[in-house]
Image: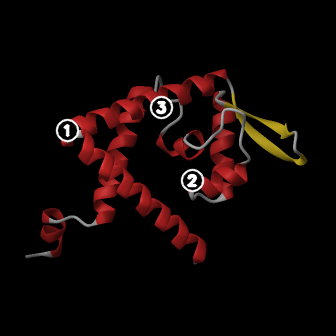
Amino acid sequence: MRRSERKQADPDLGILIARVLFGLQREMSRELRTDKSGPGPRHGAVLAYLDEEGSRATDLAAQSGQHKQVIGTLVDDLVAMGYVERRPDPSDRRAKLVVPTERGLDMMRRSDEVVAAIERRYAQAVGEEEFAVFKATLRKLAELQVTSDATT
């Protein structure tokens, strides 16, 4: 059996996670994108981690696993589209906060609703209990990965 046939018959963890992630991103993009100029899947690295009160770009980078330069570019995009703005951080005059605008807050709320609907659909498909176990296991693996990334 060729390697590609084996991979299709028994995909590894990376392939399975990518399929779920990319499918979720496509569905979210389809549900949320009102026009081609709106935020796309890559902007999730900011919007998914952004606090309603604002977040520092360095924190967004750490939480999303993206480089600060990437986050800076994504924030620039979102500022230009009217979803976020930069404001001085009241706790540190040298730092800036990335703060969602009303448009950004609406997008974040709608994103939460779409993810919740997807999760309900997944739970319905495999059973509530099995989905809860899956999600708890995936959370543990994600935490292990973060720990592993921090030590390398």
Q: Do the residues labelled 3 and 1 touch (CB within 8 Å)?
A: no
Secondary element at tag 1: helix
Residue at 26% across, 44% down: 129
Which quadrant does the N terminus fall into?
Answer: bottom left
Where does residue 73 sit, x and y in percent of width and height? 66, 48
| Eye-nearest disc, 1 or 2 | 1
Mark on residue 64? 2
Q: In this view, does 110 lie to the left or right of 95?
A: left
Badge 1 amino acid: Ala
The front one of 7 and 59 is 59
Q: Residues within 10 Å of mark 2 (few under 14, many from 20)?
A: some
Give me the C-alpha separation between circle 2 and circle 3: 17 Å
Amino acid under disc 3:
Asp
Lateral position of residue 106 relative to residue 54, left or right: left
Mark 2 or 3 closer to N-term? 2
Where is residue 2 shown, x and y percent of the image?
12, 75
Residue position for label 1: 125
